[in-house]
Amino acid sequence: MRSLRRALTFAGLLVVFVSSTPLVRWWATWLSGPWTDAKGEILVVLAGSSMDGTVLGESSYLRAVYAAWAYKQDGFRQILVSGGVAGGKASEASLMRDFLVASGVPASAIRLESLSTSTRENAVLVSRMLASETSRKVLLTSDFHMFRASRAFRKAGLEIIPRPFPDAIKRSTRWMGRWTAFLTLVEETVKIGYYFARGWI
């Protein structure tokens, strides 16, 4: 019982600390790197999640929204969406393409990479697709994901310019959103450690 009380006390103090300090914002800002709103010819967008393989998950939805804005505002010639099937009927990339088209992006401006199931595979397969492209390439993904994603792409041999958007940072502006953002950051940091250990970043 004493151990249980200690664990519950620690968990409660952690929730209070995370919810009442700028920890999440600082952590997500560090992982995102510089904010540049980078411009180029090809916008590479990484899928995040789907709901039962038929509907965009929250992270994929946000990435698609920001990709549509970037395409319309900053003159990208092409969007390459990367993400395979994650237990559903359609690839995450195809679900995001449908959203982008519905948002006004021409279908002819969208390319798909629909085999990858991880950030490492995103990087390897997209790098092969764009190996002969000399155009300026910009990588768009969530703030917390940019540290690992940008390094995975460079390790795979593709030079990209990071363009993070506020995901965990935006959640951190709401008291109720800080805890879920904190858990996302913990998970992402574990993945970063794994990628370092494997030599993928």
Image (cartoon, grey):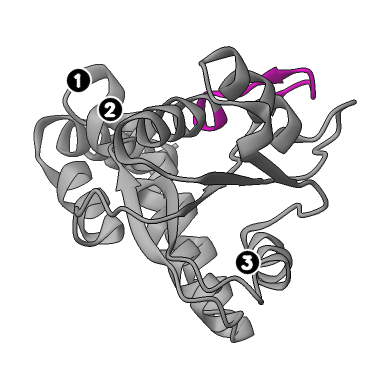
For the residue pair 173 and 139, the one nearer the viewer reads as 139
Asked whether the viewer can see residue 191, the reply is yes
Q: Does the residue at mark 2 contact the one at mark 1 (Cβ under 8 Å)?
A: yes
For the residue pair 79 and 150, the one nearer the viewer reads as 79
The residue where tag 3 is placed is 123
* Sequence order check, earlier mark of 3 and 1: 3
The residue where tag 2 is placed is 171
Q: Measuring 54% from the left and 76% from the top, which residue is drawn there?
A: 158
Q: Does the residue at mark 3 contact the one at mark 1 (Cβ under 8 Å)?
A: no
Helix, strand or loop under label 3: helix
Q: Measuring 29% from the left and 23% from the top, which residue is drawn there?
A: 177
Helix, strand or loop under label 1: loop
Amino acid under disc 3? Ala
Mark pair 3, 1: CA separation: 32 Å
Q: Measuring 41% from the left and 41% from the top, which residue is drawn there?
A: 183
Is 118 on the left-hand or right-hand side of 140?
right
* Picture coordinates of residue 64, whole percent (x, y): 51, 29
Residue farthest left in this picture: 21
Indicate the quadrant containing the N terminus: top left, top right, bottom left or bottom right. Answer: top left
Q: Is residue 100 above or below residue 18?
A: above
Helix, strand or loop under label 2: helix
Please check the rendered image and state whether residue 201 is part of the magenta-colored stretch, yes or no: no
Count of numbered circles in the view? 3
Highlighted range, magenta:
51-60
The residue where tag 1 is placed is 174
Q: Is residue 52 above or below residue 122?
A: above
Is 110 on the left-hand or right-hand side of 84?
left
* Picture coordinates of residue 4, whole percent (x, y): 43, 38
* Sequence order check, earlier mark of 2 and 3: 3
Q: Is residue 110 above or below residue 156?
A: above
Asked whether the viewer can see residue 186, the reply is no
* Picture coordinates of residue 128, whole percent (x, y): 72, 72
